[in-house]
Image (tube, rainbow, N blue to C red):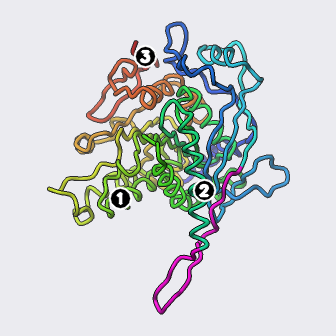
Amino acid sequence: MPRRLLDTAAILFALVLLGGCASGGRPLMPTPLLYQLPGGKTLFDPSTQARMNPDVDLLYITDRAQETMPESTSLYGQERARHISFGTAQVRLVPTLDWETLRAQSQLAKRTQVIDLELGQVRELGVFPDEPYRLNRIADGVLLRDRAELERHAAIKANLQGEVQRRLAAAPRKEVLLYVHGFNETFDTAAFTTAELCHFLGREHVCAFFTWPASTTGNFLTSYTTTTESADYAVEHLKRAIRTIAATPGLERLQILAHSRGTALTLKAVRELALEAIAAGKEPVNLYHIDNLVLLSPDIDVDIAGQQITGLLSDPDLVTVWPEGRLPRILNGRLTIYASPDDRALLVSRILFRSRNRVGQLRPEDISEKAQRYFETIGRIDLISYEGKRTDLFGHSYFTTNSTVSSDLIQLVRFGRPLGAPGRELIKTGPVTWRFPADGQAGGQALK
């Protein structure tokens, strides 16, 4: 088949695969392998179970505009807002279960009761001023920000940090888990994924999600290009969200998980925040407290991602304030990339952008020995390839639909297990690359 026809066929196939994303309820993700009974690790700390509620209460931060379509039941739609809002979103696990039944069902490989997710009350707690913020000219060439606007900004920021503090005080871990979604996601589906991750991370973190105006309707091609630019639009807002959370008193660590197109948004935001810290002569890791940065099915061109990760290392004129040429640290933990060559959703991006490769489709053998050695020298970087059976239609959401992959993710974020340790017995294929075993049993045994 000629190349042009092959490309057209692939895009048409994608139109079928990536149609509108429903905002209704959905089933709870399968139980990660490490929790499955018999012999699985206990999901919830017994000392905290007495105050557990089956519903999951989340913090959200968004630059979505409020929904204007009368048929929609969601508070926020897919249009861009000229401000940042934040609030609380409740995800219900239905049918209504008592805590003990939910706990038991959450550790079964095959549940005896169907558990669905449903969005409950969404309550907006604060709205930052519209952008751009007002300015006052006090003399020729001298501009000052409007004092009233600054006071309003400071008050809303304090309210957001107060909400984070309140949640930190009640959380077993003084950590925030921040999830950033990808293309074709609504406010509701972003909340569902965050709730699933929060639940199977033992409900120990303050669980939050940053939701941006990803397109979910209309012609696929225009929808995807709109989403690409909306992700760029959201970079400044995600930076502010991370900066605000990180500066909250009592926060010890920030865990950031991003999926699909949200990984490009997140990587760019973290890089720019690092540059801000460097310009101020401060260690980024001390300023932002980012522990793990996890990129799930990254929808990023491989060359652009490489530049984002290594750009500040390859510009000697950029970092000039550190003694003896030492480079600053950005993460306390690791940059972990989960990829799958069978990810059908990323095939579309590869065709549309004429990309050499998307990061989320990389195999260990796609990374040259020279590149592997370079990343090994940097340290704290891992690429993990999943090449097993597809567990969702697109092969794009395996971090929640595949019990082996979700188990490995939890071992990393919740238990801090290094690759190769008990519970994360993946196959090492290079200095920074790993592959799940073909039998799909990696990560099944937790440390006793």
- Label number found at residue 227: 2
Q: Quadrant of the C terminus?
A: top left
The residue most toward the top is 38
Q: Is residue 436 above or below residue 367?
A: above
Looking at the rendered structure, the secondary structure element under dot 2 is helix
- Residue nearest the observer in this picture, 312 or 56: 56
Looking at the rendered structure, the secondary structure element under dot 1 is helix
- Residue nearest the observer in this picture, 432 or 408: 408
Q: Kindly indicate whether the residue at mark 3 contacts the one at mark 2 (C-beta within 8 angstroms).
A: no
- Residue nearest the observer in this picture, 435 or 382: 382
Q: Position of residue 55 (x, y in %)?
A: 69, 30
Q: Which residues are magenta?
A: 124-147
At 60% from the left edge and 60% from the top edge, which residue is drawn? 155
Mark 2 or mark 3: whose residue is earlier in sequence: 2
Residue with the mark numbered 1: 277
The three-letter amino acid code for the residue at tag 3 is Ala
At 27% from the left edge and 52% from the top edge, which residue is drawn? 328
> In which image quadrant can residue 85 be found?
bottom right
The three-letter amino acid code for the residue at tag 2 is Thr
Residue with the mark numbered 3: 446
How far is mark 2 from mark 3, CA to CA? Answer: 39 Å
Q: Position of residue 139 (x, y in %)?
A: 49, 91
